[in-house]
Image (tube, rainbow, N blue to C red):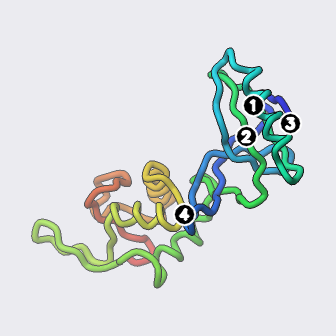
Amino acid sequence: MLILNSKQVKYCHVLRQAGGQVERVPGVAYQGKLFVKGESYGQHQKQEAISRGRQLILQQDKQLLFLVVEDPIGFTLWYQDDRVQLAAEVSTINLEKLVTQMRGVEGLQIEDRWYHLQLYPRCFVGHEAVMWMSKHLQFSRTEAVELGQRLIDEKWIHHVVDEHPFREGYFFYRFYLDE
């Protein structure tokens, strides 16, 4: 078991299998290993965190690491888990590949849509894009909206009349490639 401060680890999200589903959970990376968040303890509970880590070490069958990480609000116990993988972050997504997937067979419904007697050809709905990104990338809704805005900022998509940033609701967007 190692006792570290928050500057010695890299906070991230990891993907793990749970009941046949893939879930995105908080994680840390340390020396090439990934850890999943366990119990949290207050600022005055350092000894409890260390004791729990020691208890877990004695109970395990194989040699896995446990970290006790001190941060501004207390201590968190992190469990090494070789079955998890690093989750993609909004800033690291390859947008060209993402757009190809979004436009593919398993992608978004791109179709002509009517709104207030106006036809908007070959577009998709912001809400559906958020749901698609949440499902396919295991992103939260907030992260999916952030990724949608990145697609606008980097000129992959735009609002059909260029009036709005990316929003989750019933707003129409179009890929620049479809124009």
Q: Which residue is mark 3?
A: 1
Marks 4 and 3, the one that precedes in the sequence? 3
User: Which is more foreground, mark 4 or mark 2?
Assistant: 2
Calculate the distance from the C-alpha at mark 3 to the C-alpha at mark 2: 10 Å
Q: Amino acid at mark 2?
A: Trp
Q: Which residue is mark 4?
A: 137
Marks 4 and 2, the one that precedes in the sequence? 2
* Count of numbered circles in the view: 4
Q: Is residue 142 above or below residue 129?
A: above
Q: Amino acid at mark 4?
A: Leu
Q: Which residue is mark 2?
A: 78
Mark 1 touches mark 2? (CB < 8 Å): yes
Q: Is residue 174 above or below residue 45?
A: below
Q: Which residue is mark 1?
A: 69
Q: Residue furthest top?
A: 44
Q: Position of residue 25 (x, y in %)?
A: 60, 50
Mark 1 touches mark 4? (CB < 8 Å): no
Marks 1 and 2, the one that precedes in the sequence? 1
Calculate the distance from the C-alpha at mark 1 to the C-alpha at mark 4: 28 Å
Comparing 111 with 76, the one in front is: 76
Q: Amino acid at mark 1?
A: Val
Q: Amino acid at mark 3?
A: Met
Q: Residue at x 15, y 71 (%)?
A: 118
Q: Is residue 52 above or below residue 150?
A: above
Asked if residue 176 lies left or right of residue 59, the reply is left
